[in-house]
Amino acid sequence: MYNYLSKNRLYAVLFIAIVLLLAACGSDDNNDATDNDSDSNTEENTEQTVDSEMGEVTIPANPEKILAPYHEDTLLALGITPTAKWAIGESVQNYLEEELQDIETIEWTMPLEQVLSYEPDLIILENSFDSYEGTYEDYSAIAPTYVMSQEETSDWQVQLSRFGELLGKEDEAEQAIADYETKVEEANTELEDILEDESVAFMWVVGGQYFLFEENRHAANMVYSELGVEVPQLVKDLGETEATWDPISLEKLSELDADHVVILGLEDDEGIETLNNSNVWQNTKAVQNDQVYHIEDQSNWTNSGIKAYEQTIDELINIFK
């Protein structure tokens, strides 16, 4: 009896060992297959050669150090932190500082020494090189350099989609645009209930001068065309946006018939003091009805990125709640 049990146990042990060995081999085969799949996926996610305004450029896979001066808004919308942020001296895009406050700056003229110092994996530039110190050849010698088309430079949705394609973030780009469209739809309904057919003008006061936003100037374009806010007659009379933004005279502001006026800029600016002491300004409809509002930071209002627009929508809703 004892011998019988021992042999059976021996056979059982041998059987289990064989099963485990076969399982291990199968696991190795699966691991090899997984590794092969992983290698295959890695190969699929390698560099890609695309067309840009300056011809073909090879975009590296998963670049970690990206320079896209003035278009950090788009990178952040895709969940990417730039290696440096656009600046003019001490001035930066303030509305992005909550996310970029610890990121070093790069001068808006893109000095070659600064660019070199950041050792970028990828550089993304606007289609015009007028403001850059270097040439395309200079920058492309440092890192692969993608030059946007005019449409990609000026239309944030086109730009966001293109960046998504270049950086393997197509899903993130689609989701960001879908979320934005939902936000616009909700804000449109809310503002329609609050303002009805009342008009709103937007004016930037800086250095004692007054800049009235045309219908398609920066964030005003979104407010008027997407949120459906009524355009004052004087704003309509300004016509299409020109490349040069000319100040409007105090005397001309006497014609401003807006029901509401949003003033952007520091409240201690000399221009604000002049307005407060001006009979011309004090007699406008919005002032008479106590419908003038102040927002100190104009940075999101003078930009056209998705994050800029979302912040503008939030501020506008908060003003009129």
Image (cartoon, rainbow, N blue to C red):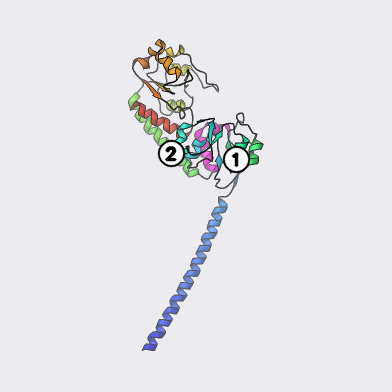
Residue 122 in the image: x percent, y percent?
58, 42
Q: Nearer the viewer, mark 2 or mark 1?
A: 1
> Residue drawn 45% across and 74% down?
19
> Residue drawn 53% across and 63% down?
32
Secondary structure under tag 1 reads helix
Residue nearer the viewer, 166 or 296: 296
For the C terminus, give its image quadrant.
Answer: top left
Q: Which residues are magenta?
A: 149-169
* Mark 2, residue position: 178
With respect to residue 12, does 75 lie above or below?
Answer: above
Residue nearer the viewer, 182 or 289: 289
Query: Can you tell which mark lies on residue 117?
Result: 1
Residue 189 seen from this side: yes
- 167 inside magenta stretch: yes
- Relative to 93, is 147 on the left or the right? right
The reply to whether discs 2 and 1 touch (Cβ–Cβ < 8 Å) is: no
- 119 inside magenta stretch: no
Residue nearer the viewer, 86 or 5: 86
With respect to residue 18, does 30 lie above or below?
Answer: above
Name the kind of residue labelled 1 in the image.
Ser
Secondary structure under tag 2 reads helix
Name the kind of residue labelled 2 in the image.
Ala
Q: Earlier in the sequence, mark 2 or mark 1?
A: 1
Category of crowding for the residue at label 2, using alpha-carbon neighbours closer than 10 angstroms: few (below 14), some (14–19), many (at least 20) = few
Category of crowding for the residue at label 1, using alpha-carbon neighbours closer than 10 angstroms: few (below 14), some (14–19), many (at least 20) = few
